[in-house]
Amino acid sequence: MQVPHWRDPQGRRATVQAALAGRTPEEQAAIVRAHAEAVGAIIHAAGEARLREGGRMEARSLATQAARLCGELAGLWPAGSNEPLA
């Protein structure tokens, strides 16, 4: 599976809100579609992991990542919230 988050031009992790900022409505719609498709793919992978023998922990990890990405779309998890506290 690909990395389940957006990246800025320097390759640093970014939120979907950052990806949407300053884009045209058409570009924003395309980003939202791509985001939703990626979240769906992660949920699907979580379901498949859950069905495999010994896949419960992987399923939980994937479901947690999908939930965070859903929260980003709703405006939760602002930029920098994924970085360790100093």
Image: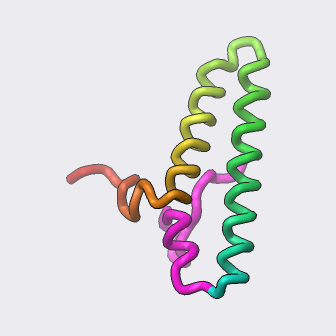
Where residue 3 appears, as percent x and y from the top left, is 63, 53
Colouring of the image: rainbow
| Residue 3 position (above or below residue 12) | above
| Start-end of magenta stretch | 1-23
Q: 73 and 54: which one is in front?
A: 73
| Residue depicted at x 48% and y 66% | 12
Where residue 2 appears, as percent x and y from the top left, is 70, 52
Considering every residue shown, the one lying at the far left of the view is 86
**Residue 8 among magenta residues:** yes
**Residue 12 among magenta residues:** yes
Where residue 6 appears, as percent x and y from the top left, is 58, 63
**Quarter holding residue 59:** top right
Q: Is residue 82 left or right of residue 36?
A: left
Q: How many numbered dots are placed on residues in this image? A: 0
| Residue 51 position (above or below residue 32) | above
Q: Is residue 81 left or right of residue 47?
A: left
| Residue depicted at x 40% and y 53% | 82
Q: 63 and 52: which one is in front?
A: 63
| Residue 27 position (above or below residue 51) | below
Q: 29 and 8: which one is in front?
A: 29
| Residue depicted at x 69% and y 19% | 55
| Residue depicted at x 68% and y 49% | 39
Prevalent SS, magenta region: loop
